[in-house]
Image: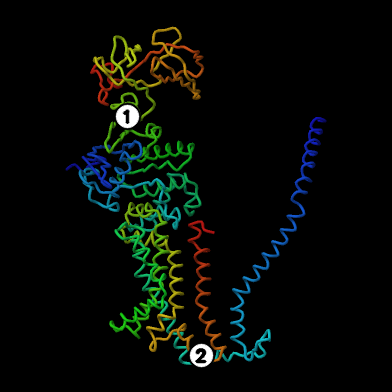
Amino acid sequence: MSAVESEGVVLGGLGEAELPVAAAARGPRTSMRSVGMRMLGGLFVVCLLVFMIGPIVWLGLRAFSGLWQFPQLLPKQWTVAGWRTVFKDPNLSHSMKLSFEFAPVVTLASAAICLPAAYAFSRFRFPGRRVLLISLFATNAFPKIGLYIAMAGVFYSLNLMGTFLGVVIVQLIGTVVFMTWIPTAAFSAIPRSLEEAARDVGAGPLRVFFRVTFPLAAPAILVAMILSFLAAFDEAQGTFLVGVPNYITMPTEMYTLVLNYPEQVAAVFAMLLAVPSVVLMSLARKHVMGGKLAEGFQIR
Amino acid sequence: MTDTANTGLRIERVSKDLGGRTIVDDLDLDVRAGELTCLLGPSGCGKTTTLRMIGGFLFPDRGRILIDGRDVSGLSPERRPTAMVFQNYALWPHMTVFKNVAFGLKLRKLGKREITERVERILELVGLTHHIHSFPARISGGEQQRVALARALVLEPKVLLLDEPLSNLDAKLRVRVREDIREIQQRIGITTVFVTHDQDEALSISDRIAVMSGGKVEQYADARSLYRWPETTFVAGFVGSMNFYDGTSAPGGVALSDGVVVPCDDLSTSEEGAWRVAVRPEDVQVSVGGDGAEAEVVREVPRGHYKELVLRAGENDVRAFVAPDLEAGDRLRVAFGRALLYRDGVLHRAPKPALVET
C-alpha cells in the first residue's frame, strides 16, 4: 500500500518537474504569437467577405435605391422603379424569356451529345482517346472571342447567323467540357463488375445502363447539367455575335442595359441573372448531398 | 450432346488469347451436376478467364462450353443459366438488399408477391432477413458476400460461379463463410465452379479440384488424390509443402545427387534411373539411432500442433514435420516413409495394387 503511494508521489513529482520546463520554453511566446495569428486570420476572413459579398450587397442596395451618391453609406431614397422597368419593358422581359428557353435546350442537347461520348471515353479504349479527351479543353484554352470570330465565318456560309440553332451551337461549345469530363470521371468510378453483375442476372446492355450505370452516375451528371445550364445561361460574347439582332438573351441585354438604362435597372437585371445560379446550386446541395443517393454511397 | 438431361457443365477444348498471349490453352473440364469444382492455381494461370468464359463475359476463341448438354459458347451473360458471385461482390449501392436480390426476378416479369416470397426465402437461407431493407454500404463484408450469394441463387441457375469470393474477408471469417457456402451448395445441390488461389480453401470445400498452370489443367482430382498423388511436379510443389531432390533409385531407397542414400520402402515406382524425387515433410521419418541417412538439425520451427524441422543431409535440406514435443538434439537419422518419383515433370507409378488410391 505504502509502496504504491510512494510510487505515485515519485511519478507525480517527475511529471510536475517536467511540465514547468516545457511551459517556460513554449508558454508566453506561443500564446502571443497565436493571438497575433488569429487576428491576422480574422482580418483575412473579413477582407475575403468584403471582397466576395460586398459587390452583391452593393448590387442589392442599388436595385432598390433612388438617389445614392458617393459619400453616403446608404441610399437616400428607396424605390422599386428599377424592378417595374425591368418587368414592363418588352425588350427586357423578352430577353428573360429567351434566356430561359436557350439554357434548357442547350443543356439537354449537350447531355444528348456528350453523355454517350463520356460513356465511350470511360468504357472503351480506342485510338486517339486521350488526344480527343484533352482536345475538349481547346475551346477553353484559346481566347473565346477569336474562336467566335472564326465561327462567325463558318456560320455565315451555313446561314446560321441570327438563327436559334446558331445560338444553341455557340452556347453548346462552352458546356462540352463539363458535360464530358465530369460524367467520364463518374462512369469510370463505377466498377465494371456492377454492370457485369446486372448482365449476369438477365439485363441487356441498355437496361444495364439505365438501371445501374446511369443512377450511379446521376449525381455527377446532375452537377454537370447544372454547370452546363449556368454556362449557357451566362454566355454573352458568342450569343451576342451570333444572335443579334434576333436573339438577345439576358447577358447580351446587359451590354445595352449598362449604356441605355438607369443604373438601378442594370442592378435589378444583374440580380435576376444570379437567380438560376443560386436556385440550382441549393437544389444540387439538397438532392445530391442529402438524398437517397448519399445514403447509398455513404457520402456526408 | 444430344442428351439434355442434368449433365452438369462441360468445357471442351476451349482456348482464349488475350492481348496476344494464350491465357487458356485447349482446356477440357467436366463438372458433374451438383458437384463443386475448384479452379486452383497461381495468378495468371487462366482460372479467372476460364470462369468468365463460363459466365459469358468472355467468349472462347476455340472450343465450346456445354451446360446440361446445351452449347452456350455464343450466348451473352444474360442468356446463360449461370450466376456469378464477384470478387468484390458487385452489389448495386443504390439498391437495398431486397432490391439487389429482386432485380433479376423483376426482369423475369414475375408477380410482386412471388418476388417478395422468393427473395425472403433466399435471404433466410443465407441468414440475412434482418438486413432486407439495408443498403449494401451499411452491412459488413461477410454480409455483403452473402447478399451476393443470395442474388446469384435466387434465379435458380444451373451453374453457380464464384470468383475468389473470400479474398476480401479476414482470415477467421473466410473459414466460416467458406463452410457456409459449401453447406448451402450441398443443400440445394447446385453445380458450382469456384476460383481460388488459396489451396487451403480448395482442399477443404471441393468435390474435385482442377489445378491450373499456364492455361492448362495440370491435374483434376479430389482433394485426397491431389495431395497424395500429384501427377506433375507443378502440382506436387503447389499443393501442400514438398521436398524435391535429384536422385536415382538405389536398393532399399533413393540415392540423392550428392551420393547420400536415404532408405525408403515406399517408392512410387521401382524403375531404375535418374528421378526427381518428391517427399512430403510428414513422410520424413526421423530417429536418433535408427536406420537412415545422417542429418544435422539446422532449425526448429514450432507450428502449434506439429513441429517443423529443417535438417541438412549431405548437400540437401530436408524439411520434416514431427510431433510437437520431440526433442530433436543436434544429429538425427532420416528416412523417407514415402517418395514420389517424377521424370520430365510427370509422376511415374508402378501398376501394383498396393499403390492404387484408396
* Chain letter behind tag 1: B
Residue A231 higher or lower than B150, as above or below: below
Query: Callout 2: 10 Å neighbours few (<14), some, many (20+)?
Result: few
Task: Report if the CB atoms under discs 1 and 2 are less than 8 Å apart.
Answer: no
Residue A154 higher or lower than A136, as above or below: below
Residue A60 higher or lower than B356, as above or below: below
- Residue A166: x and y in percent read 34, 81
Q: Quadrant of the N terminus of chain B?
A: top left
For residue A259, the mark is 2
Q: Is residue A73 left or right of residue B47?
A: right
Q: How many marks?
A: 2
Amino acid carrying label 2: it is: Leu
Which is more foreground, mark 1 or mark 2? 2
Amino acid carrying label 1: it is: Val
In percent of the image, x 61 and y 79: which residue is there? A57
Element marked by disc 1: helix
Please name whichever residue, A245 or A7, is drawn nearer the observer in this view of the structure. Answer: A245
Q: Is residue B65 left or right of residue A241?
A: left
Element marked by disc 2: helix
Question: Can you identify the residue that label 1 sits on?
Answer: B235
- Residue B11: x and y in percent read 24, 40
Image quadrant assignment for residue B3: top left
* Chain letter behind tag 2: A
